[in-house]
Image (cartoon, rainbow, N blue to C red):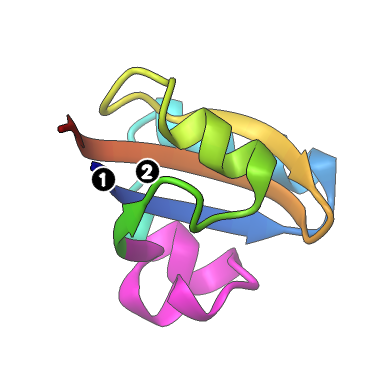
Amino acid sequence: MNRAIVRHILVKELVLATQLKQKLKDGADFAALAKKYSLCNSAKRGGELGEVKKGQLVPVIDKLVFSAPERIIQGPTKSKFGFHLVEVKFRTDF
């Protein structure tokens, strides 16, 4: 079964998502930004979603999680909830 360890930041505005991605590229701490800006319940855990299984997330994010390279920030990706920055920390494909 496909599984991944994922963290993400969810915001409403594309501009903010783009700014946060740049901060991450410049070396900002993912967990600190998630705690400060993310609208998801995972914010209090530094954006950690933990282990997710294929089909568990909204389709656009699920597709991203199970196709994107590991340890590279993806996004901003739009869903019905807002704009996501996603990092796949680890993935298995068994």
* Amino acid type indicated by mark 2: Ala
Q: Is residue 20 visible?
A: no
* Looking at the image, residue 18 lies above or below residue 6: above
**Closer to us: 55 or 70:** 55
Q: Which quadrant is home to the C terminus?
A: top left
For mark 2, what is the residue? 28
**Predominant secondary structure, magenta span:** helix
- Asked if residue 43 is positioned above or below residue 81 in the image, the reply reads below
Q: What are the residue bounds of the magenta stretch?
A: 32-49
Q: Position of residue 15 (x, y in %)?
A: 82, 40
Quadrant placement of the N terminus = top left
Q: Secondary structure at mark 1?
A: strand
Q: Position of residue 83 (x, y in %)?
A: 73, 47
Residue drawn at x 46%, y 59% is 33
Of callouts 1 and 2, which one flags the residue occurring earlier in the amino acid sequence?
1
Residue 91 makes an appearance in the image: yes
Separation of residues labelled 1 and 2 (CA atoms): 27 Å
Name the spot of residue 70 as percent of width and height, x first.
27, 25
Could you tell whether 91 is left or right of 20 in the image?
left
Q: Position of residue 85 (x, y in %)?
A: 56, 42
